[in-house]
Image (cartoon, helix red, strand yellow):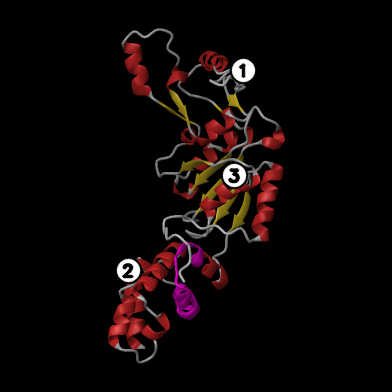
Amino acid sequence: MKSTASFNPRQDIYLMKDPRLEAAIEVALDLGMPLMVTGEPGTGKTRLAYYIAQQLLGVEQPLIFNTKTSSKAKDLFYKYNALTHFRDAQSGKADINPMDYVSFEPLGRAILESASKRNVILIDEIDKAPRDFPNDVLFEFEELAFRVEEASREEVKQWAERQSTVGSGQAVGVKVDEQGFIRFAGKIEERPVLLITSNTEKNLPEPFLRRCVYYHIPFPDKSVLQEIVQAKVPLEAAFVDKMLPAALDYFREIREKKLRKAPATAELIAWVHLLHKKAINVALNRARGADEKLKEELMRTFTVLLKNKEDRRRMEDELKRL
């Protein structure tokens, strides 16, 4: 009998079973500090934002900012459509306010909605950003306030007054201070929850890290890996009983060889799906003295498991020597 799992190798996996991670989340919520989470791809960093939003705060989904190599601090808060503003100005449109050409990004939206809603913001893979990016947002993180550079203080206040109601008639309550900063307007204990993820590809500035609660998600052990695989790949019971344990052991053995790029859970999920589809028994195919055809059959599956030509050549050579 096949399981009811649905194969989706692109979806992150998250299993909330680590009491130390639960403690880190609790501290971040209690102190209103950003939670910085590191770990290998596929360990559940992104899915953690959905867990906090849906299970802890009752919010449908988090607001997500996908960091890029070109990201700037203000990109977290808003985007300004200068071209449309210029065209309208050239056409003679009356009562133009730069704020009408601003669209708000995740942290900006969370601050705007803070009087009526507590959001979860995910800043994903912050280590992709330029070196100055984390330090440039320190003030905004702590104060939960930002300025729209393209608008004057008076223009921001005029815009804020027009935002007093939305279509449903519900008060929005945008808070603007005397300097023209748009500020957090909720209670202190209802600050937006800020989750920041990093693949630890480069070190982040110390002043930034001091303002965060930090937790590193360890790579799953064999029992958790099996749960992950069975949750994501529709497997026959016979494969789970007779073939999956050997596949997991071989996967863990490969990871311990300190390759240039160790396979992560995403590769494992795709690999097990392929093994099941091809009915490949890893224990049989890599047994000492196994037929060359069996070894070749297993080596062909390395295309989804190993993403570096040196790593693949090394594992193929080892398999051939058995």
User: Of tags 3 and 2, which is closer to the observer?
Assistant: 3
Question: Which residue lies most toward the front here?
Answer: 1
Q: Which residue is mark 1?
A: 178
Q: Is residue 189 visible?
A: yes
What secondary structure do most residues of the magenta stretch adopt?
A: helix
Question: Which residues fall within the magenta stretch?
Answer: 229-257
Checking the image for residue 242, the label placed there is none
Residue at the far bottom: name it: 289
User: Residue 258: x, y in percent?
Assistant: 45, 72
Q: Position of residue 298 (x, y in %)?
A: 34, 78
Q: Earlier in the sequence, mark 2 or mark 1?
A: 1
Describe the element under mark 3 as helix, strand or loop. Answer: helix
Q: Earlier in the sequence, mark 3 or mark 1?
A: 3
Q: CA distance from mark 3 to mark 2?
A: 36 Å
Q: Which mark is residue 303?
A: 2
Label 1 crowding class (10 Å Cα cut-off): few <14, some 14-19, many 20+? Answer: few
**Cβ–Cβ below 8 Å for labels 3 and 2?**
no
The residue carrying pointer 2 sits among few (fewer than 14), some (14 to 19) or many (20 or more) residues within 10 Å by Cα, namely few
As measured in the structure, the alpha-carbon distance from the residue carrying label 3 to the one carrying label 1 is 33 Å
Q: Quadrant of the C terminus?
A: bottom left
Q: CA distance from mark 2 to mark 1?
A: 59 Å
Sooner in the amino-acid sequence: mark 3 or mark 2? 3
